[in-house]
Amino acid sequence: MQPVWWVWGGAAAAVAFVLSIDLQHPGESLCYSKQLLDLACPACGMGRAFNALLHVHLTRALAFNPLVLPAAFYVASLMVVSMFDALKGTRYTHKLLHIQFSRVAALLAILVLVLVWIRNLSLY
């Protein structure tokens, strides 16, 4: 069995899990940063955001965490490329997993993470 099928199986299980639970209501936080330090991290709200995105509630997903769209795009593209690799025998997944960023792109990514972190600190 090709390893890519494990990726798809895990993704299907994760989607089924996220669709089956209700993350919209407050409860025990799954975030270790929130539990240990009582501070929201840049990814806080990402579980609820993915849940809302899977239920096609785009505005709600963006309200939970604006990083959900780039993260969802990256995960979806990684899954499509890995399936292509499995079918065609190519190695594009390796390239997608090992992207080389310029210094400006890396600084921009850090700035975005800091801004989202500040946003999450005020919300959560």
Image (spheres, grey):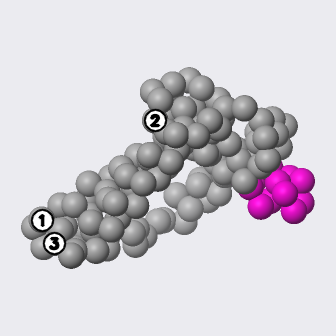
Closer to us: 113 or 40 = 40
Rounded to the nearest angstrom, the CA distance separating label 2 from label 3 is 30 Å
Frontmost of labels 2 and 3 is 2
Closer to us: 71 or 98 = 71
Judged left or right of residue 9, residue 107 is right
User: Circle 1 — which element?
Assistant: helix
Q: Are marks 2 and 1 in contact (CB under 8 Å)?
A: no
Q: Magenta segment: does it hold 34?
A: yes
Q: Earlier in the sequence, mark 2 or mark 1?
A: 2
Circle on res. 54:
2
What is the x, y in percent for residue 57?
A: 51, 25
Which contiguous range is marked in magenta? 31-42
Circle on res. 90:
3
Q: Earlier in the sequence, mark 2 or mark 3?
A: 2
Image quadrant assignment for residue 4: bottom left
Specify the amino acid type for callout 2.
Leu
Rounded to the nearest angstrom, the CA distance separating label 1 from label 3 is 8 Å
Specify the amino acid type for callout 1.
Leu
Residue 86 lies, with reference to residue 44, above or below; the image says below
Residue 117 lies, with reference to residue 63, above or below; the image says below
Judged left or right of residue 106, residue 56 is left
Specify the amino acid type for callout 3.
Thr
Image label count: 3
Circle on res. 87:
1
